[in-house]
Amino acid sequence: MSLLSRRPGGSRSYSAFLGKGIHKVSKVAARHPIEMIVVILMAASFAYFYLFNLARTSELFIGTATTTTRLSPAIVYSIDGQPFQSLPLDAATTDDSLFSSSPVKINIKQIIVSDPQQQHRDDVLVNSAAIQKFQHLIENDIYVPDTSAKQFKYQHDLCYKEQPQSIVTTDDGADASTSTCMSVKPVLLQQSNDLLLSYVFNTSSAFRKNLADVWEHKVATLPSTDLVSSINASGAHDNVLVWLFILSRNIVFHLKDLIHVADNVDIIVVLVGYVMAFSTIISLYVNMRSMGSRYTLATAVIVNGMFSFMLGFLTVHMLGVDVHATILAEALPFLVVTIGFERHYKLTKSVLQASKKSSISKQDIRQTVLNAVDAVALPLSRDCCIEITVLCLGAKSGIGGLREFCLLSAILLAFDLFFMFTWYTAVLALKLELGRIREISSTSAESTKWDKSATTTPTSPTSTNSSAMPTKTRLIGRTMVKAFSNNDVVTSNSSNKSDDPIIGRIKLLLIVGFVVMHLFNICSTFESGPQVDITHTGISEVLDQVLDQYKRTALSDAATLPTLIVEVSPPLIFHVVKSGWNIVPNAIAEPLASLFGIYDVYIQHPVISKWLTVALFVSLFLNTYLFNVAKQPKQLIEPSSSLSATTKPHQLSATAPSDIQPTEPIINKKQSRLRKSKHQHHQQSTEIRSLETCVSLMQTPDELLDEEVIRLVQAGKMAPYALEKTLGDLERAVGIRRALISRASVTKTLEHSALPLENYHYDKVMGACCENVIGYMPLPVGIAGPMNIDDVHVHIPMATTEGCLVASTARGCKAINAGGGASTVVTADGMTRGPCVEFPTVIRAAECKRWIEQEGNAMLTDAFNSTSRFARLRKMKVALAGKLVFIRFSTTTGDAMGMNMISKGCEKALGVLSETFGDMQIISLSGNYCTDKKPAAINWIEGRGKSVVAEAVIPGPIVEKVLKTTVAALVELNISKNLIGSALAGSVGGFNAHAANILTAIYLATGQDPAQNVESSNCITLMKAVNDNQDLHISCTMPCIEVGTIGGGTILPPQQSMLDMLGVRGPHPTEPGKNAQRLARIICAAVMAGELSLCAALAAGHLVKAHMAHNRGNAATTTIASQQQNTVPVTPSASPIAQPSSPATQDKKVASKYPSIGVGDLEHRYQKDLMHFHHSSPPLGVQLALGHVGRGS
């Protein structure tokens, strides 16, 4: 039932008002849970810091040698000047009607000064200058209060004046008379030789009483001078461990003293209270665990109670009620039992049941929480109000101790109710939101486990009996859970069944019972401690002095003396600071003392001290890190120096200094490979253990040496193909496998070969790219271009070991750019897979073919498309070969190459096909009708992957100046070589000069499958003279470019960097498949550039000479070594740069610098702007170098 529903009778308005208030507060908490949690945490933090500073003045924090039992003020009275008689504290502080006339109230504040060094010199202590200075300070220099416009001091305002009693004022002001204060002589205590100072205050009004208490607090917290307060002495322990030790010691001594003076009934009652408190907390965790929350919700409830306690205790303190630590320790278990956690449990249950009415992913969490709160708010708040009312009655009883306990409990309950509908409601809302997010994302199987058990059906007796007999441990555990949990509430599924009120009734009876027990003095657990002993020699002397002076200063007629009520406060303890000869002069000591005083303030601050500690750790961490970094360069340089000493002299002389520096890091890595491994450092200093010992350590491979792992593999105890999984260190596994293969081979050279091993992303390779890894094979990567492809300048990466390939492609790019760039078009996009199925007869095979091409086409398409978000079936081509049926699926696959994607779709489609044709038998998922990695006419005709056509027009002058040939010669060579020659050879798709060269180099650089160059390099190159036979039109048609930008080798970081450079890495954000199509366009255009350059070299007759110059490693190396001391090679620039120079000058420079190579002029001339192409005519040597690109011509 909703909180806002109207009820008949007079309680309707009250219920509606309370319901609206709770509803609004809960609404804010449900809509803004994080903000609500932060606000409550801030309020609790302020309360914590205030209470912490307040608790530091407690006697439990005093680091004195002995800790005494807490003392309460003693109240004595005198009627008509008679000797003092004791009066109960509660009677004196509650009502003045016990006396016939208005009594005179005074308060004696005592200060005990002790000096262990002068215990046997009484006169020195009494007449000490430090004592006199201290008395003057507290009598004349302490003003109260701090916030008032008018402040008062003891000597003139607060003390009891020596004047006729009729003049004594009882208003809220201080005495304005000029009479002297009542003075009490210091008393020397005989037993301890301590000095007792007494000060008499006029406390005839509440205002005066408050001023006296404030004065006492200021005296107790005076800064340390010649005398130091015992309260301030407790702050001398900066060490946390010492502080905790002293606190624990004081608590133990305090408990010991309390046990000695307490009755057995009191001890039993407190002990039972603590047992019940721990049982309540355990029951909370057990019940919350039964609903699926292990710790979160139960801990949130405990934190809710802690916040309520802190704010409740702070409120009680602000109201002027002094709750001593002893009362608090005795009351704490009963507070836990009184408040309990039943309300929080019922609210949690209501929220979880409301969240189970429908799927949490479709719910409005805020409304769900509000509905659950509305359902239980009124019953919970009603029970809480009844408990608060009972506790308020106990607070009005006036019994010492019980009054403070009941008042604190009532205020604490109010705060707990408030926080339950704010803090805890926000926690529940946040918990449901997190559960909703987990269920929507489906990232965890336990996303809704914590709220499912709120409506779990209880286990039936039959199922329990049929289960196996539990062990003794499980039986005890189940008994404990059953004892501390409310199974009826937890497992109830009925929403109409009312909650069991037994626990609430028991709690209410406990509260009433404790109040009644204290009202009738059945036990005295919360009563005040012992009072000040007024029979003590020193205190009795002080009281006698006060009474004598009161008689003398009152009226002469003693019969009219008003009743005198004296409150004797517990003494404040001060110690004389030990004095000695000062080595440091005061001029130096005082500034240092001031500096250290500031340091003490910050180091003792509860917040600043923690931040200083954090800053210290951060500073230590940064210093350690920086020192380690400073040492690293020295460690890296040392191996290079030792390596250079072992280098052969003739190698050093044959290598220029400029070449040594870039090779040092590579050599260092190879030399220090074993030293860097975190496992190899054991190999030289540790002996190889026995095989049996190694077998026992297989579960902890880090403890095994590499040689021991090799021994285990050789003995058959460890699989060599699973070293990565077994060892957990990928690089170590590769090194060990490498050693195993090397020792098992004939040459035994692999283990120490130049094949790289370290610093590779083996985690990317595992399970994706390669198995039985022994290292990686680096390939040189060159850049051709930039090339204008579809009005975008692209640098083309090519990984190859063939000389002239990149340079020749770059020349073709230069010529195509001069004609305005290349244009490309994608004519088709569809990866194929051709499974093979078999039927009993050819008739059934023909029926299957007709069904696929007609009514079954839509069914197979739907089944195929259901397997992926990107795979979309375009067409199916069916062919028969006897009883065999071959189905060629053609599918778009987004930006992936798509072989795995299309295989998954084919399996699904064949499953649907087998449901229609039950006699069909699947022979192979791939029936070579695709066709993959094999030359096939069907790929050439139908296409596979991306079908791309590229074209360009090269002006005639560019053909002559750059390519060094003519348009007619190129057209004639293309017809004779690429068309007629390939036809005579019976080639399928090989009507080109060397398309596979460029395509494979780009495949290797960008992480494609290099084996697919078989069909991907299918290309027909056509050339034709256009524009009155002045210009050259060239086109390349490639119907089978199989590429992708995700998956496969594209997951490796080096290959990803090349895709990044091309701007096609990963899936396209808006148009799936566009990145892969763009890569296919770039490949086709690059192939066209390579075709143009090679055909031009063949037409000019430069092929053989270029190969002789560039593909002879020794000759090239010798030539470079002889020239590099005077010249530096120039690499191609990223963009053309215009440099004004004459053609004759450039030809002379190139011929003088590179007489045998000629590549330098090509690279240098490549940087020229296109407008200067007709001015730059390379010499014959350069033409020879640029002739050949591939060996496939």
Image (cartoon, grey):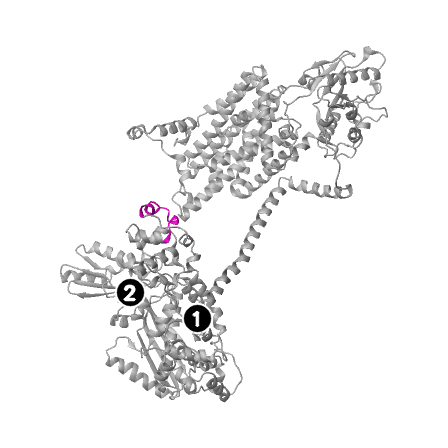
Q: Secondary structure at mark 1?
A: loop
Q: Secondary structure at mark 2?
A: strand
Q: Which mark is residue 914?
A: none
The first of marks 2 and 1 along the sequence is 1
Looking at the picture, how far across and down is residue 998, in whole percent? 36, 74
Which quadrant of the view contains residue 143? top right
Q: Identify residue for label 1.
A: 648
Q: Is residue 652 left or right of residue 974?
A: right
At horizontal 50% and vertical 21% (from top left) the residue drawn is: 272
Closer to the camera: disc 2 or disc 1?
Answer: 1
Q: Is residue 79 left or right of residue 1027?
A: right
Q: Main secondary structure of the magenta part?
A: helix
In the rendered view, tell whether residue 697 sits above or below residue 143.
below
Looking at the picture, how far across and down is residue 724, in whole percent? 35, 54
Looking at the picture, how far across and down is residue 486, in whole percent? 42, 28
Q: Which mark is residue 832?
A: 2
Q: Which residues are magenta?
A: 691-706
Whether the magenta-drawn stretch holds residue 699 is answered as yes
| Residue type pointed to by label 2 | Thr
